[in-house]
Every structure is written in structure tokens, then in C-alpha cells.
Image (tube, rainbow, N blue to C red):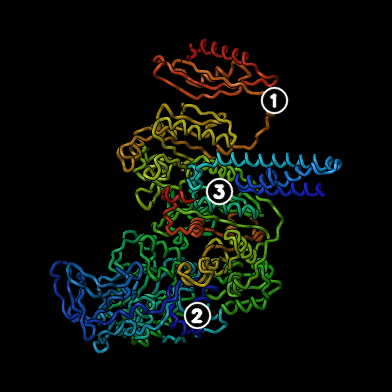
Amino acid sequence: MDKEKIRGLLKEAEAKIGIAKGLNEVEKIKKEYLGRKDGQISLILRGLKDMKPEQKKEVGPMANSAKIEIEKMIKDKEEWFLLQGQEVAGFDITLPGSKTTTGHMHPIEIVRQELEVIFNSMGFDVIEGDNLVSDYYNFESLNIPPDHPARDMQDTFFIKGHKELVMRTHTSAMQVKIMEEREPPLRVVVPGRCFRNEATDASHEHTFHQLEGFIVDKNISISNLIYTQKMILKEIFKKDVKVRLRPGYFPFVEPGFELDCSCLICDGKGCPVCKGSGWVELIPCGMIHPKVLESAGYPKGKYTGFAFGLGLTRLAMMKFGIDDIRLFMDGDLRFLKQF
Amino acid sequence: MNLSYNWLKQYIALPPKPEKVADDLTMHTAEVDEVRKLGENLDEVVVGLVESIEKHPNADKLLIAQIKIGPESKQIVCGDLDLSERQYVAFAKVGAKVKWHGEDDWTNLEEAEIRGEKSFGMACAGAEIGLSDKMEVNVIDLKKDYGFSETELKLGTPLNKLLGMEDYLLDIDNKSLTHRSDLFSHIGFARELAAIYSKTVNLPKLGNLKAANKVNLKVEVKDKELCPRYMGIVLEDIRIEESPEWMQKMLVSYGMRPINNVVDITNFVMLEYGQPMHAFDLEKLATPKIIVRPAIKGEEIITIDDQKRKLTPEDLIIADEKGPIAIAGVMGGATSEVSDKTTTLILESANFNKTSVRKTSNRLALRTEAVLRFEKGLSAYLPEEAMLRAVDLLKEYAGAKEASALKDEFKLKPKVNEVIVRNEYIYRLIGEDIKPEKVKQILSALGFIVKKTNGAIKVIAPNFRTDINIPEDVIEEVARIYGFDNITPKPIVSAINPPSYNPTIVWKRRIKEALMDLGFTQMMNYSFYGDKELRNLNFDPKTHIELANPLSEDQKYLRTTLLPGLLNNVERNLYIDENPKLFEEGHIYYPDNEMDMVGGVIVGDSEKVFFDAKGLVEMLLKQLNVDFEIRPIKERAEKYSKFWNIFNNQADTEIRAGDQVIGTLSLISPEILLNFNISGVGNYAEGKDKFVVYFNFWLDELVKEANNDKKYKPLPKYPDVSIDLSIIISEDIKWNEVEKEIKNVNISLREIELFDVYKGKSIPSGQKSFAMHLKFRDDSKTLEMDEVEKYRKEIMNKLNKQFKAEIRK
């Protein structure tokens, strides 16, 4: 009987000591078990003298070691509280954290790297190119001969004394260059700076960032284009987006499209951002024009493909809610340190 | 391009909601930017009568007018607008929507006080209330400009009611029509809608011409390439008067100002069929002979906008036997212009080469409705229908009679382009199985002739289409009418090819991330700078590529370095951050090559910031596992020689990896910092002295050196023993010489860390002290202190022998 009881008391004491929340509580526990007058273990020990010798032999050592064990547990706990008390004296966790500094990534860089990772994971190569390019790669190879009215769509910076050179007006300027060097299947994105000679205001910049993408293979179709764009937008916005494809004209694609996505601000219900239409024009795209594939030197009719352009600057504005495009190139640390 | 909904309805039955028509056009043909209810903004613009005009008491150039708009009158303050008493004006009341100077966005007109006089509205020019695109010199005179009689002009009547503007305008984005010359017309869009809605188009019935030979009209086309077709006819008994009201309304709704019946009819037919036309007053011509030819050098013409224009042999002109009477496809000449007195005219309906029209238009900076259409490449079949239509209308509304035979110089007929499209290719390109019957139905609805052959279709486009040349063009027609939205999205089926590893991209990311970890904030600056930057850096413009058409003078050179951009960034941010650390990754441009660079600046309060910068650069390079050496620059390539003047000679270093220079690290000279207002009394500098270090790397070179090839070294088995050593040495001796000597003394020496350099008190002049930690370790045993003491002595002996160095006590 007593043996069971001692074991029980020991367990009980251990549990109580474990959850004790302060020195006072520990003191109480000590009294409860080891108190001289009526501590539970003390009572057993005191009762030894009335026991039969063989019972005494059995219970005595057990009660004694239980006493020693509880004493030790209590001592440890008391010490722990004492140490704690020393360390935390006057500790104010609401004081500010120590100042450390780190740099900040430009918001366009953030979006660009995010997209590069997404496209890389979908099997696209990331390739960069020059900003100053020949008229041939920027226009002619893309089925935009001199005096084509489509040149009006892209106000171009020209170079003094070099009629054949332009600041690229779109990252599409890399299409034929890359195709010349590589044989399909091709999945490529080209991020980078583009330039248009137009006056700057809150929504226009003469320097902006695009990401051109294209896929060339033997049997690439419009239905592939729609599927791929949906996937890309899903990855970018981290949710399913509705898209619609409608005719658009760009000389280097045929057929050419504008891809609209349902407005993320109003969920397609219509708001000032989408001018009430529920749609936001997002990605100009199309099936690569046979003349472009011809410029690349591919055998006639062998390949088909599609190309698309993403406005990195525009995406960054959407992502971070930036309402003035000029901030990107303004170099104001109050702006840049927010990222 | 504006489409009038009412106008379209003349040719085809349409859904009752213009918005629905707009949506369907957007999805199948071209984007409709906006559907505008006509005259919505004109509710608050009313008929007003100028009662009196006085000078403004406090301003010479201002007038005060009283405008009667019913029982009441309103006072306005206005400029000298050619306003006269008893004039009927378009009066915008307070609260009306107006466009200032005919530009910008709509704004609400408010009550104003100008130099002490109140103004409660304004008398408007057409462009200010959206009735025209170009700002006119004078305000509208409703009698003179719009031909209303006084009985029609009930004071206070809203203008939209007066003008009968109950229509909707569909504003089409011209860019999306660049390849569709046939769509710059109402009939063109009616045809599209007919295909979309499977309906038929009711085209105007065209009459026949009566044979006449009173005048022997001659037409001579000298260059058939530039003018594939020229149709002309002489019409007599012309009465010049106003065009019918319905026609005026249509022109106004498009945004054109009615002029007289002849001009209005040519404009109307242009908007109806898309064919620009022109009428010459026959009496003003030398003879009834039209010559279409390139201009002769030195020839001039005064165009109908009263501008004298010099012509070149590049320009195609219409001439009579004396000289130019019109710039072909661009604008007519003033001398042969139809006037109130015109009774006989030559009507022109012709086809001109698109490139030639566009070149001339660009050279003269003269954009007209005719250019807009011709430069897209109009069909050479179009002039015929337009001619017949215009003659019909002139007969009906101007009393015209044929006075000559119809001359038709059609020297260059377009090839009939039969396009063969294989059924399999339709499927391959669209990815959707559209049945051949459906394909045929769609194309036929668009006016194509379709013949089925084995596994393919042979297609001939209608003659008004000039954009159908290859199978892809035909497939686009099928797909867009079928509806892109009806195509099922399908994943690409192809072999799995992982993207090729592009080390440049990967390492550039790493470099930028490392810089950010080291505390640098990323900048993006323009690729251009101006004379200010060149002056500040003493750069020669000749070493720069220059834009031919810069947006502004301060953005005209292509940058040859990231430095000025970063220095401008420092200057503008000094008030936010006293000692910023900034970097940029971007391209620089030299005549022979474009290079991707990463450049950074570190700002500090003494020249010691150089060592902060050096430490950061060393840390960057260690992260990239680059084996490098930083040493003074002894020579610079010719194209970089301009940089000699920018940096402090004492602290101008290059960073090498083997033989290759991969970057530079230099302290910028104080003069340059003054120029950029970073030091001195400039903007935020506030008289402080600042020190700036600039480093930059040629990214391609740096990426070549960067690597992950790290090899594990076993952890040491025996402990290190560290001692300090402090020496006094001549101040001419450089640290790296000392370091080299110490390293050579003993193989147990594992690390040398210089922790103090001191000159001054307790050090003899001309001397300095170096204090360093030395760390020894032997890999075969635990080093004893007396062994290490022995090494210290050896080192001191060596330094003493080599440099006469002494232990500092």
C-alpha cells in the first residue's frame, strides 16, 4: 500500500513542480510534501517507527529516496527561478530592435526576377540583348519595312549620323537575332529596357521595361497560345484569371491579338481602372508572322510559333499600386526604400 | 476613326444597343475605344445672342460681353475673339463641360472673376465643345458657320437639340486598322458587321453616267507605279450651296465642318466608301488636262490651308499644263479650289501609291484624312464606286451634269491573288477543328470567293481587300469571325527540354543580391544624359553616341558610364541619407560596343571611405569566389582615358582577375563632387565635405570569373596560436610589401590581420606604425609558445633587414 502511495506522491510532486509558476508556488509544494508537521512524505517517514521491521525495511529506503528526489527537484526549480529573475530584471521588450541596414531591390527588378523564375520553371530560356540595335532587327526583320505606317505606332529614338541604328522600341527586336542563332524548339523570354520618343507624364515614360516571350516549334497553335497565356497569368497573379483574346494588329504576327484579363481590381465588374469594361488590356500577342520566320532563315512552312509582350513596368505598377510611372527612374530613396 | 451608329444603320440592320455593336466589333474586328453619346456634353451649351460688347475696365486685351440666353442675360469676360454684337454664339453656361483650347480633358466650366469682373460662362469655339478636332481661331457663329436662320435660333436652346445630335459615335483605335485600308469607311464596317451577324449589306444604288463630250478631258499619268488608277470627269451647271441637312449632320457627327455641297459630298463619299476624292474648279485650270507626275525640283504649291509648300521630285503631284494643282493624295491646291463661283469642275477619284503618299506627308508634316487612308494602301477598284456615288449625289444636290466622258486611266491593275490554304494548316495554326463548311461560310460572308479542292481551299479576296496575301491572312479571317473566344485552350505537346543554363543571368542575379546584402540600394537611371553631366565630368561630347531626336537637351547623349547617374542620385538623396550606398546595373554605350555594367557609389565623411568601399568590394568578390587583386591603375584603354580626370590619383585602382581587368575602384576627386553639388555649398551638401568612392565591374568579365568551385579543406587538428606584433617603419613602405615579407618567413603563419595604422604622437616623424594579429598553426603538432616567439624574432629580423623596421614598444 505505502509503496504505491509513495510512487504516486513522487509523480504528483514532480508534475506540480514542473508547472509551478514562481518561487511562492514551489515553497507551497515543498511544504505539502516535505513540511515538518504534515508534509506527506514526512508523515510516512514519521510513521516508520510504528511499522513492522520487514515493512520498515521495505518502505523506509523508498520514502527516504523519494524525499531526496523531491528536495532535488525543488532545489533545481528554485535555482532556475533565481537565475531567470536576475536576467529579466527591467527587461522591456517594447524597446526598438537594434538597427541594421540592408539594401533595397528596385521594384522593377523584383518583378523581373519573379517573372524570370516563373518562365524558367516553365522551360523558357532567359536571354538579354543590346538596347542600341539596327533598324533591321527592330523593324525590317519583323515585317515593318521603311515607310510602313506601323512605324508611327512606335515613336523611335534615332542616332545622329547612323541612320541604321535605333534605340530598341520593343524587346521584340531580339526575336530574329535569337532565331538566327538557334533552331526550334524554342522557348525564350527577353527582359529588358525599351525606349520610345514620347513625352513623359504620370503614365508615360520614354524608358520602360518589357519582357518579350516566344515559342517556336512544329505545331504551335492559337489554342496553345491561349492555354499558355492563361498559365502564365495564373503564375503571375497566383490565382485563376479570366482572359479574352480579340483581334489586334502588329505587323510581326498574323493573326495578331490583344489579350485582356479580367480586371483584378473589380473582378470584372467594371471600375475606373478598366474604364468600366471589366477587362484590362495586358498582353499584345499573336502567331509569329511567316515573314519573321523567313527572316530567321527557317525553312518555309516548317515551324509555327507565337510571341507575346509583357510590360514589366506596367506589372510593377499593378503589383505595388504605383500610380506614377516616373518614380521608377527618379532615384528617390524614399520611394526605393519601400521595397 | 469615328463611326456613326445611325450612319451604319443605313446599310445594315443592327442590334438596338450601340454598346453591343461595339463589343462585337472589339471581339471580331478592331477595338472600339469608346462609345460616345453624341452631344452629351452639349446639354449646358445653349444658343446665345451677343447683346453688347465693352472694353474691360481693368484690362486692355479683355472684353466684357452680355449674352442673352432667353429672358435673362449673362455677363462674360473674354479675349478678343472676333465677337460682334448681334452674333449668335454657342454659349457654355456655368457647369457645362468644355475642353480648354480644344485640348486636354473635359472640365466643368466654373464661375470666374477676371480682373475684378465676373464671368458666367463662355462663347465657345468648335473644338472647345467637341464639335471639331482642331482649335479654331474664332468662336462659333451659328448663323455664318452652321447656316441657321434667326427663326431657328431660339435663345437658350441646348446645342445638341439644335444640331439634332441624337447619335452614338464608336471610336475605333486607328492603330488596330493599320492593315485594313477598307475599314476607314462606314461601308467597310457595315460589311464586317454583316459577316459577324450573318446579315446582308444594303449598299447605295449607283446610277449610270450619261455620255457627254462638251469638254474633252484629258488625263495623263506619267508614273503608273505611283498612280495605278486615275478617274476624272467634268461636271457642269454646278450650283454651289449648302449640302442637305442630313449630310451636314453626318459630317458634324464625324467631326467635320460642313463647307458647301461639293466639298461636303466628296467628304461624305470618303467617309462612306473610304475613297478620298477631290474637285478642281475647271475654270481655274489652264486647259482641261490633268497630268499626274512627280514634282520638278523647285516647284511650289499653295495648298488649300494657304501654306506655300516646296515640292521635290519625290512628291507626286496633280498638275495642269501650267503647274501643280494638288499634292496627290495629300491636299489640293488653293488656286483650283472650288469656290462659291464655281460652275464647272473636274471630279477626281484616284488611287495613289501608299509609300509615296506617306513619304510626302511625312516630309511636309501634313496629315490629312486623305493621307490617313491612302498610306494604308487602298484598293484600286475603289475609285469607281466612289466616283459613281459622288456623281449621283452631285446631280441630286448640286445640279451637276456630265460635261465629259468618264476618263479612267487604269494602267496598273492589281494581280488577282488566289491564296491556297490547306485544310490541315487551318487546323494546325488555329488548333481547333473548324469544319470546312464553316470555313467556307465565314469567308463567303466576308465577300471571299472560295473554291474547294483536294484537302485545301482556293480563296480570292474581295477586291476592296488589299491585306490578304498569304494563307495566314485567310486563317486570321476565319478565326476572328469564328471568335477567338470560341477556341479551346490546349497545352503544348512537346518533348521536355530543360531551359539552357544561362550563367550570365544567374550570376547577375547573385551579384545584385550580394550588393543588396552589403547594404546597397538599387537605382535605375536613364540611358541618356546631357551637357550638364559632360561639363561636370569634363567629358568630350565627341566620345559619345548622340541621339538624332532627343526628347530634351538634357537627355541627348547615350551614357558611357553609370557614374553621373549615380552621382545625381547621391546629390538628390543626401538630405534623406547622409552617406548612401547605391548601385545600378545597366548598359553603357560606345560606338563599337554596348556593355552591361554594375556600378556603385559609397559616400563617407573622410577619404577613409575608400577602405570601407574596398572592404565591401572584397566581400562581394569573395562571395563570388573570384581570385582577384586590387592595384593602382597604370594605363587605361584609349576609350576610357577620359576617366583619368575624375579620380584621385592616389586612390585610383583596378580590380584584376589574372590578366583581366574586371573592374575599377576609385576615390572621386573633390572637384567632381563640387560640380555635382555633393560637396561644397550645393543643394543638400550644406558646406560639408563629402567623399565618394565609385566602383564598377564589366559584368561579362566578372561573370566569367565568378564560380561555385569551392573545395573543402579539412578542419585543423591542432589549435591556433595568436600573437600581436606592432612595428615602426618608414612611412614610404606600403603595407603589401610588408605583408609579402612576413608571409615568406614561416609556413606555420596562417593569417595576418592588420588592425591599426598610426602616425603621430610617440612615432618619429617620417615613420608610421603597423599593428597586426598573427595567427600560427602547425598541422602536425600543437605549437608551443617559445616556438612562436622564435618565429616572431625571425619576422622582426627580416623586417629590420629589409625595411629597417623596429618593434614598437
Q: Amino acid type of disc 3?
A: Glu
Q: Crowding at label 2, few (<14), some or many (≥20) Cα neighbours within 10 Å?
A: many
Tell me if B367 is positioned left or right of B636 in this view. Answer: left
Q: Crowding at label 1, few (<14), some or many (≥20) Cα neighbours within 10 Å?
A: few
Q: Which residue is mark 1?
A: B717
Q: Is residue B38 visible?
A: yes
Measuring from the top left, give residue B763's x and y in whole percent: 41, 16
Q: Is residue A139 visible?
A: no
Asked if the residue under mark 3 is in contact with the one under mark 2, i.e. CB atoms within 8 Å, the reply is no
Tell me if B91 is positioned left or right of B275 in this view. Answer: left
The structure residue drawn at horizontal position 43% and vertical position 30%, both measured from the top left corner, is: B608
- Name the front one of labels 2 and 1: 1
Q: Secondary structure at mark 1?
A: loop
Asked if the residue under mark 3 is in contact with the one under mark 1, i.e. CB atoms within 8 Å, the reply is no
**Mark 2 or 1 closer to N-term?**
2
Same chain, labels 2 and 1? yes
Q: Is residue B604 above or below residue A190?
A: above
Q: Secondary structure at mark 3?
A: loop
Same chain, labels 1 and 3? no
Q: Which residue is mark 3?
A: A128
